[in-house]
């Protein structure tokens, strides 16, 4: 995966890294064009931003999890980043979630904006059961599709276990988004203050508004006058 780093302050590396994962057929530089990177700077978040060219082909050939681990997260850890957050839009949000499902413990938080959460029939099953808290996941999934494994994992946010901690998950979506029905299922399982909504559908104006709102509550460090940052090698 190709990447492009935006340092929080030129010539220095922050302790925190935000890894931005685009949606299907979107380009990583669109995060710049749509104000995501500037919003981090305006908020004075003490975090570097890494734009990842995680195009849809990685999902088609099911190599996304391996490539994200090998090409992005392992090098970031080796460079000394102490905290890594994944910020994914649409299928990028799906990728962030499924990576944590498959390789738990490698990231410190996830922001999912309008995430794709799987096929509609599975969401319909959960709605029919009365929501994610009431749904009883099958002990043996009927197929090997990743969304059959994702929803039981997401259900753990409704019933946290101290012995199996989950990374903080923040969800944002437009109320007219084509995936909003599934978003609502997840929203009901998340803690108060972890869900953000806006008017509109599945497009950049909504995602940009959500990101700016979420930055005010995400547990990310802010710059202080005498922050000690690590110099880039």
Image (spheres, rainbow, N blue to C red):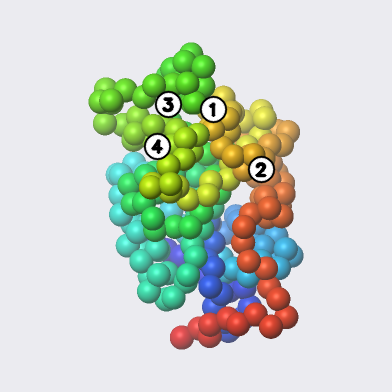
Return the x and y of residue 8 as percentages of the image width and height.
62, 73
Q: Say which of 89 and 111 sits in front.
A: 111
C-beta proximity under 8 Å, tags 2 and 4:
no
C-beta proximity under 8 Å, tags 4 and 1:
no
The span from disc 2 to disc 3 (Cα, nearest Å) is 27 Å
Residue for badge 4 = 153
Label 2 vs label 1, nearer the camera: 2
Residue for badge 3 = 119
Label 4 vs 1, first from the N-terminus: 4
The span from disc 4 to disc 1 (Cα, nearest Å) is 13 Å
The span from disc 2 to disc 4 (Cα, nearest Å) is 20 Å
Q: Say which of 194 and 113 sits in front.
A: 194
Q: Say which of 184 and 51 sits in front.
A: 184
Label 3 vs label 4, nearer the camera: 4
* Apparent side of residue 75 relative to residue 181 in the rendered image (left or right): left
Residue 185 tag number:
1
Res 79 → quadrant: bottom left
Dot 3: what SS? loop
Residue 64 higher or lower than 46, as above or below: above
């Amino acid at each position: 995966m190709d990447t492009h780093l935006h340092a929080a302050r030129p010539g220095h590396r922050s302790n925190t890294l935000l890894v931005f994962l685009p949606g299907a057929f979107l380009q990583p530089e669109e995060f710049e064009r749509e104000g995501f990177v500037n919003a981090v700077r305006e908020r004075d978040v003490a975090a570097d931003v890494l734009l990842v060219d995680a195009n849809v082909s990685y999902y088609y050939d099911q190599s996304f999890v391996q490539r994200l681990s090998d090409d992005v997260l392992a090098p970031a850890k080796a460079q000394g980043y102490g905290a890594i957050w994944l910020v994914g839009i649409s299928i990028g949000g799906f990728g962030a979630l499924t990576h944590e499902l498959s390789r738990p413990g490698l990231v410190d938080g996830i922001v999912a904006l309008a995430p794709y959460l799987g096929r509609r029939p599975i969401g319909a099953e959960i709605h029919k059961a009365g929501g994610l808290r009431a749904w009883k996941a099958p002990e043996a999934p009927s197929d090997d599709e990743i969304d059959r494994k994702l929803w039981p994992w997401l259900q753990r946010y409704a019933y946290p276990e101290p012995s199996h901690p989950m990374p903080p998950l923040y969800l944002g979506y437009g109320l007219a988004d084509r995936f909003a029905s599934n978003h609502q299922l997840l929203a009901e399982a998340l803690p108060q203050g972890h869900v953000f909504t806006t008017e509109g559908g599945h497009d950049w104006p909504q995602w940009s508004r959500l990101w700016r709102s979420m930055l005010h509550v995400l547990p990310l460090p802010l710059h202080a006058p005498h922050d000690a940052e690590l110099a880039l090698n």
